[in-house]
Image (cartoon, helix red, strand yellow):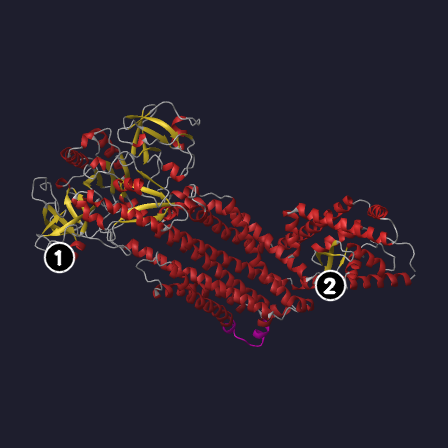
Amino acid sequence: MASKPTDLLPGTLDLLILQALAHGPRHGLGVSRRIEQITRGTFQVKPGSLFPALHRMAEQGWLRPEWGASESGRRAKYYDLTRSGRRQLEVERKRWSRVSLAIESALEAT
Amino acid sequence: MSRFRSLLRNLISRHRADAELDEELQAYVQMLADEKRAEGLSPEEALRAARLEVGGTEPVKEQVRDARAGAWIESVVRDLRYSVRSLRRSPGFTAAAAITLALAIGANTALFSVVHAVLIRPLPYAQAEELFHVSEFWPHEPPFRRVVSPDYGQWRESGNSFEAVGGYGRGGRGGVFHLTGDGEAERLDGAAMTSNFLDLLGVRLAAGRPFLEDECLPGASPVVILSHGLWLRRFGGALDVPAKPVTLNGQSHVVVGVLPAGFVFPDNEIVPDLVVPLTLPTSPNWTSEDEFRVMRVLARVGGETPPQAVEQELTSLARSTAEIEPVQFQNMRKDLEVRLTPLRDHLVGDVRSLLWILQGAVAIVLLIGCLNIANLQVARGLARRKEIAVRAALGAGRARLARQLLTESLLLSSAGGAGGLAAGYAVLPWLREFLPADLQLLRTVHVDGAVFAFTVCVATLTGMITGLAPLRVAFGESLQAGAGGGQATSGLRSGRLRSALVVAQVSLAMVLLSASGLLIRAFADRAAVDPGFEPRGVLSLRVSLRGDRYSDSAVRQGFARRLLEQAGALPSVESVAIAGGAPVMGVAGAVGTLIAGRPEPPAGNAPAVPFLQASPGYFETLEIAVLRGRDFDSDDRENAPPVALVDETFAAEFFPFSDPVGKRIRTGARTGPWREIVGLVRNVGAGPGRTVRPQIYVPLEQSSLSDLVVLIRSSGPPEPLLRPVANLIAEMDSNLPVHDAAPMEQRVYAALSVPRANSVLMSLLGFVSLVLAVVGLVGLLSYGVKQRSREIGIRMALGAQRQKVLATVLSHGLALTGAGMVIGLAAAPLLTGLLEAQLAGTAATSAATFAGVALLFGVVAAGACLVPASRAAGISPTEALRHE
């Protein structure tokens, strides 16, 4: 299954980040690794798209940034889901299942 | 909220946000390198590989910044665009709301600019909170507000509880200076000050230097400091002290300095064009009139020292001079006290409470306006339930919707704020008309940064208030009910909220109206009080007979006699009088008074009674009734038997059981002559809130007087008489300036300016609040009728009477009004309690006034409710049912 890493589909980055944070706070690299892990290496998020997205979502109030110590003892910024972040995750999830359902049925209809 | 904070952070500490971002990215690179090292790379290689993979942190940072700013701006722009569109869909509501807000915010802005300049902003002097006005007074006497110069000298030499004292006064002859020489001769207002006075205030001259100590000694060569205005007007204003001396009152003065532009002299009674040194004797001397001055004093008290300590020291220093004083002063001075008044209180006086009351009142009007708009917004919110519900279903979060609705309110209130700033600027000159003209601090009123900030805050707050109420409705109901599209069910909760808003409006308006009702009554009471004289048609002016030429009392008497004679002969003059004072203009002084045949009180304890020198014709000119006995006549001369007239209060106080006419009194307990009381006259200047003091009148020619008040009754308007009278005086002595000339009526008018401003402005605000509250009430009822038109139609189709429908709507309106009025009446005493000072003489909870206000409100509200009620009664069942 794990083949070449693919570019993200537009609109999926937010969902993936929210999903990556669903089980507790992570720092930037942690988010990126977690996305790789849960998509089984299909998606790799580069810092050039990861950090703008993290900051934008923090401003939207979905993520709460906080400084903490990494496993290797470095000072790193951790991101955690806020309540509205969790709600947003639900919204994005539903939207995604609608979209994917629609795409699937579109493809099957041929 | 976190978004707001992060915006703030972005704006305030860009650098810090950038540094944090940098740190975050560095940590990312380091952790990436850590991973690579774990895979077996050397530390250097790992770091290099990590850096290569990230591809430079700068572009990443740039992208983050874009995302951050972009997200914010984009969503704000989106909200704004949405709000503009939605406001444009209801232009009527938008215009009404924006205008209401502009007017209400404008009133707040205008008032705040005055409050700020007069009550809040530091006075225009260095560390102004350390400055105090010093006055001497006697516990049982009317306020003196002055200091005698020997005490000032004593304080300056021996006092050490304060940092400095400085003195000032009017200077010249009653503050009048005649400028002659180049150009037209001009009459100027002057002031005098001690050499340290500007230093005491911490005021720097625009050019030149302050007075030197030597220049304030008697006999020093005359010098002058010009005001900035005079300097610009007469001397071209290049900021350099003119080398040429100026001629003032015939004497050449060297100009040593120019006051700064916008300088406010720290006394409302003195607005100088120029300042001369206040000449004080070198050593205190009580015996010679030249060595004894009445002056005004300011003190600077260090921040740590309590003013009471300074008062104590000044009092004991002043009393310590008793031994060196002539005997007639000693007893008078033993209960002398010294009072320190913060300079602002001295300058502002009773305008303070007036301003706070008005500020409170305009705030209430704004609040009522806000409630009105909130109510309209609730109604609109109901109309938009469907739209909001659809948007919510499409995934717009609550916060998102709330922000959109709030943006709309804030947009509206910003428009109102902008309009309010303009409106406030426009009404400011009008507002100033109502405030006492002599309040010098009014010159410093500007629409400045603080006023702007205030307006922005008020507008924002307004937006919050008008935006939050509709939010409750939007979320309370729209989400469930709206999507169903039901029209027939009228939201119970929104109905209750809107009713509550209207009740709040009515009660606020009721409070304001009650206050204005009381103030109008207090003003009417005061204005209606018979002043005891007739000011209409009387011209009043002052002439001071000072200097060598008039040192002899006989010369002054001769001048007065001639002036009376010649002014009396002018056309349209009905009568003329000269006196030592006049009602509203102040009375010369008081003397210790003894009654013949009664035990003499111990020396110095004779009751001090106000005492006025008056020529024959005084009572005729002012139309003060002579109740018994006779008026003064031309036979009451210097060598004729001394006589006096007394007023009703004097008679009541000293002769409660007998007729004073024919009795003898001694004016001036030890040295004065015994006088026979030849007549009894009416009280003058009485009124609620004023203690009436007894008054003695003595003939002008049986007294000595230098500062004359001239009163002329005209058969027509008094103003045109000024020129001929001034010419007449100029013919008699061209160096005698006429000053403080004004029709008596104008003085009486000005004396009531604060209560008038109170009642006029408060009634205006009360009226506005009544209109706003009634508009809110009618809006609520009309909306209800419109919403329920189908229901009403069905009822009528089923046989309901039109009168019944009318009565239902009407009683709903009246019930709301009644509830509001009850709450308002209960709350009114809280506000009117604050008005006590303004309501002197009127009971603060005057039941009749409250009842009148309630009646007025009830009638207006009932009349207004008839409009929606008759519309309801006019609904045709067929029309209403056809809609569905």
- Residue B799 is one of the magenta-drawn residues: yes
Q: Dot 2 corresponds to which residue? A: A86
- Residue B7 is one of the magenta-drawn residues: no
In this view, the residue in front, B685 or B419, is B685
What secondary structure is found at the residue carrying circle 1? loop
Q: In this view, does B810 lie above or below B613?
A: below
Magenta span: chief secondary structure: helix
Q: Can residue B268 be seen in this view?
A: no
Q: Which chain carries label 2?
A: A
Q: Is residue B128 visible?
A: yes
The amino acid type, in three-letter code, at marker 1 is Phe
What secondary structure is found at the residue carrying circle 2? helix
Q: Residue B655 carries which label?
A: 1
Q: How crowded is mark 2: few (under 14 residues within 10 Å), some or many (20 or more)?
A: some
- Left or right? Give the position of B260 relative to B736: right
Share a chain, discs 1 and 2? Answer: no
Q: Magenta part of the protein: which range?
A: B793-805
In this view, the residue in front, B351 or B337, is B337
Q: Residue B882 carries which label?
A: none
Disc 1 vs disc 2: which is toward the camera?
2
Q: Position of residue B541 (x, y in %)?
A: 25, 39
Q: In which quarter of the image is residue B620?
A: top left
Check the image and name the residue furthest to the bottom.
B798
In this view, the residue in front, B572 or B137, is B137
Looking at the image, which residue is at 49% across and 53% down?
B104
Quadrant of the drawing holding the N terminus of chain B: bottom right
The amino acid type, in three-letter code, at marker 2 is Arg
Q: How far apart are marks 1 and 2 (CA)?
A: 93 Å
- Left or right? Give the position of B739 relative to B555: right
Q: Position of residue B850 (x, y in %)?
A: 38, 64
Q: Is residue B658 above or below residue B296?
A: below
Quadrant of the drawing holding the C terminus of chain B: bottom right
